[in-house]
Amino acid sequence: MFDKRRGNKNAVDHDRAPGGSQAPVMASAPPPSAVSKVAVIGPGICITGDISGTDNLLIEGQVKGSIKLDAHEVTVGKTGQVSANVTAMIIRVSGTLQGDLVGQEKVIISGTGNVRGNVVAPRVVLEDGAIFRGSIDMDPNDKVLKKSAAQPGKPTSAVTAGSASAPATLAKTADLGLKSG
């Protein structure tokens, strides 16, 4: 076969796949700025205090305090132990979490997850085997969700266990104290 670029008859055409068909053009990877960064708290790390930022967060260690990443994801890995109120776009729990969760989009408690606290989110997923004790408020039109998203300095949830002054949305919540599976 003759290769015009090289001028010799026996050169291999690297743009063609075996059998003479045109090789597929590979899509380039998205630019680094389009890929979300993930901050990791490793299994040997213990943090006490308030966490906020502009990256997604993976927790495999221990966190005590509060976590506020409104436009990002917070993931508590299998070895993660969190004692904090968490506000994020998406919250995933595979480890242990004690505190209230406010998910702007959704909260996912995996089969290995153990959550003790109230959950406020338009979508909540409890996988088979998940342990959960608290209340769930899934009303996407609820003022609590909109208020907590709009006012970062305010408490994350107006729904508290045993509170006589809890809002009318408490009637819509489910008080679950069960282990699925």
Image (cartoon, rainbow, N blue to C red):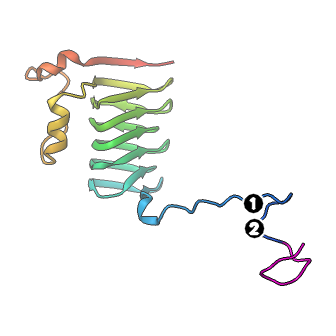
In the rendered structure, which amino acid carries the disc numbered 1?
Gln
Q: Which mark is residue 22?
A: 1
Where's residue 86, x and y in %? 28, 42
Considering only order in the chain, which callout, 1 or 2, is on the residue closer to the N terminus?
2
Which secondary structure lies at badge 1?
Answer: loop
Instruction: Say if mark 2 contacts mark 1, CB within 8 Å.
Output: yes
Where's residue 4, x and y in %? 80, 79
Which of the image's four quarters has the N terminus?
bottom right
Q: Quadrant of residue 12?
A: bottom right
Classify mark 2: residues with Cα within 10 Å, few (<14), some (14-19) or many (20+).
Answer: few
Q: Is residue 112 left or right of residue 177?
A: right
Classify mark 1: residues with Cα within 10 Å, few (<14), some (14-19) or many (20+).
Answer: few
Q: Which residue is mark 2?
A: 15
In the rendered structure, which amino acid carries the disc numbered 2?
Asp
At 9% from the left and 20% from the top, the residue drawn is 164
Span of residues in magenta:
1-12
Q: Is residue 18 left or right of residue 122?
A: right
Q: Is residue 133 above or below residue 93?
A: above
Where's residue 61, x and y in %? 43, 51
